[in-house]
């Protein structure tokens, strides 16, 4: 029975913690994007870093104007001209604090909920700059002034793959093609037609020379010449 009651109480506390806490960006995410102060302005940070009395979340009023809520694990801020300001919060009782702002000054106010008769009693305490700055980074923003979280770092582009040896060799050995420069108004040269040389005439065939047979030396000798040859020599 005790274990069941303990588990139920833990579940209720967890639900209250997550349901009642601020859900804005962390101070560490918005600190670089907060607006800058004017020449005669100061800033007041209100923060609550304790979960005691987490279900009690009274509104915070500064000089009659609601500026935020006292939520566990949260912070908010207001920028005001130099002067004196009173912050109050009320449940069954009222808590208050007076803050004097000077030009360009930043004040830190820690909010809390104390034990009350029926509910809780809101409280305010002025803290030093060192304590306030160290308490803010993990807290979530719960104010009404629009703020933006710092942009995520860009994903580095993937390096381009190196050129393949084949492509590099082809680029290195490629011979540039040079084109002849042509004048804009240059006239084309006249075309000269070269006639082919005439082929030499073939050599005439040699006239055949009749061959006289030695066997018949007088076969074609005239008759008169034969008679002269046959006459006896005187």
Image (spheres, grey):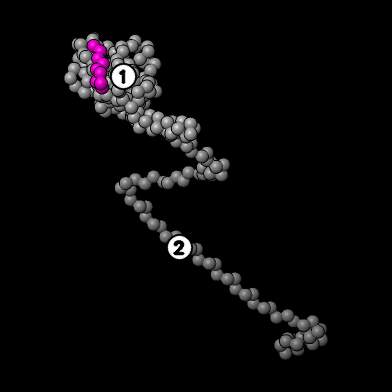
**Residue identified by numbered label 2:** 195
Residue at the spot x=44%, y=36% of the render?
A: 157
Q: Position of residue 193 (x, y in %)?
A: 42, 60
Residues rendered magenta in the picture = 90-98
Q: Residue at x 27, y 24 (%)?
A: 58
Q: Earlier in the sequence, mark 2 or mark 1?
A: 1
Give SS at disc 1. Answer: loop
- Residues at marks 2 and 1, CA–CA distance in whole angstroms: 127 Å
Quarter of the view holding residue 151: top left
* Residue 79 seen: no
The residue lying at 37 percent from left, 11 percent from top is: 130
Circle 2 residues within 10 Å: few <14, some 14–19, many ≥20: few
Q: Nearer the viewer, residue 118 or 221?
A: 118
User: In the visual, does 52 lie left or right of 206?
Assistant: left
Q: Position of residue 173 (x, y in %)?
A: 54, 42
Say which residue label 1 marks: 116
Q: Secondary structure at mark 2?
A: loop
Q: Which x, y percent locates residue 144? A: 25, 27
Check the image and report above or below for 24 versus 109. below
């Amino acid at each position: 029975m005790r274990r069941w009651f303990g588990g139920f109480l833990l579940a209720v506390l967890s639900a209250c913690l997550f349901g009642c806490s601020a859900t804005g960006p962390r101070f560490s995410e918005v600190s670089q994007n907060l607006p800058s102060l004017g020449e005669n302005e100061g800033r007041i940070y209100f923060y609550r870093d304790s979960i005691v009395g987490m279900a009690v979340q009274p509104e915070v009023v500064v000089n009659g104007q609601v500026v935020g809520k006292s939520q566990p694990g949260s912070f908010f801020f207001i920028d005001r001209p130099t002067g004196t300001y009173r912050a109050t919060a009320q449940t069954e009782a009222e808590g208050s604090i007076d803050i004097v702002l000077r030009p360009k000054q930043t004040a830190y106010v820690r909010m809390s909920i104390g034990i009350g008769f029926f509910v809780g009693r809101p409280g305010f305490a002025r803290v030093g700059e060192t304590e306030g700055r160290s308490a803010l980074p993990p807290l979530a923003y719960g104010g009404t002034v629009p703020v933006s979280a710092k942009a995520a770092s860009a994903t580095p582009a993937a390096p381009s793959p190196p050129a393949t040896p084949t492509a590099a060799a082809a680029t290195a050995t490629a011979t540039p093609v040079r084109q002849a420069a042509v004048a804009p108004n240059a006239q084309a040269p006249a075309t000269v037609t070269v006639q082919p040389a005439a082929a030499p005439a073939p050599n005439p065939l040699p006239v055949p020379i009749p061959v006289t047979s030695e066997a018949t030396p007088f076969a074609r000798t005239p008759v008169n010449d034969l008679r002269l040859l046959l006459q006896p020599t005187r």
